[in-house]
Image: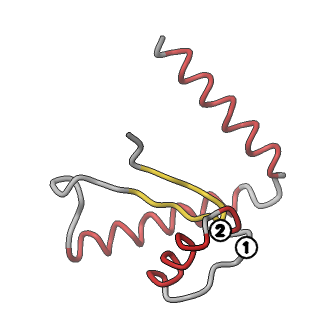
Amino acid sequence: MDNIAIQRADELPPDARRAVEQVLGRALEHDEEVSIMALPPHQAPTGEARKALARQLEDRINKTAERVRDVSTEEQESAIDEAVNHVRSQHK
């Protein structure tokens, strides 16, 4: 069972898109990507720790996005595919 889902906003089913928009409190742009992560209760941070981790994650995502802003989507996807294939070949 997967614990993480990443999907473009324009690929979300309408009811899922409405739910995400309701949680965020704003409309999604069609080309935004939506990430959802489910953690068991004993692994999920709470309170201020959750807020701090969310800020750290957002900062990291923004830094990564800045580093690849001039790289085409095709090149990004190719690099991800290459990395996934490499990792999978190491675990056989």
Task: Say if 5 sits above or below 31 in the image.
Answer: above
Measuring from the top left, give residue 62's x and y in whole percent.
59, 66
Disc number at residue 9? 2
Residue on which disc 1 sits: 30
Estimate the spatial distance between the alpha carbons at disc 2 and disc 1, rounded to whole Å. Answer: 5 Å
The mark nearer the N terminus, 2 or 1, is 2
- Is 79 on the left-hand or right-hand side of 45? right
Give the farthest residue toward the bottom.
Answer: 25
Q: Is residue 6 left or right of residue 11?
A: left
Please say if 91 is above or below 9: above
Residue 15 in the figure: left or right of residue 4: right
Q: Is residue 63 above or below residue 48?
A: above
**Alpha-carbon neighbours of circle 1 within 10 Å: few (<14), some, or many (≥20)?**
few
Q: Are marks 2 and 1 in contact (CB under 8 Å)?
A: yes
- Structural crowding at the residue carrying mark 2, measured as other residues with C-alpha within 10 Å and reported as few (<14), some (14–19) or many (≥20): many
Mark drawn on residue 49: none
Q: Does residue 65 appear to the left or right of 45 in the view shown? A: right
Q: Which amino acid, mark 1? A: His
At mark 2, the secondary structure is helix
Q: Position of residue 12 (x, y in %)?
A: 62, 64
Residue 89 spot, x, y in % from top left:
56, 15
Q: Residue at x 68, y 62 (%)?
A: 11
Callout 1: SS: loop
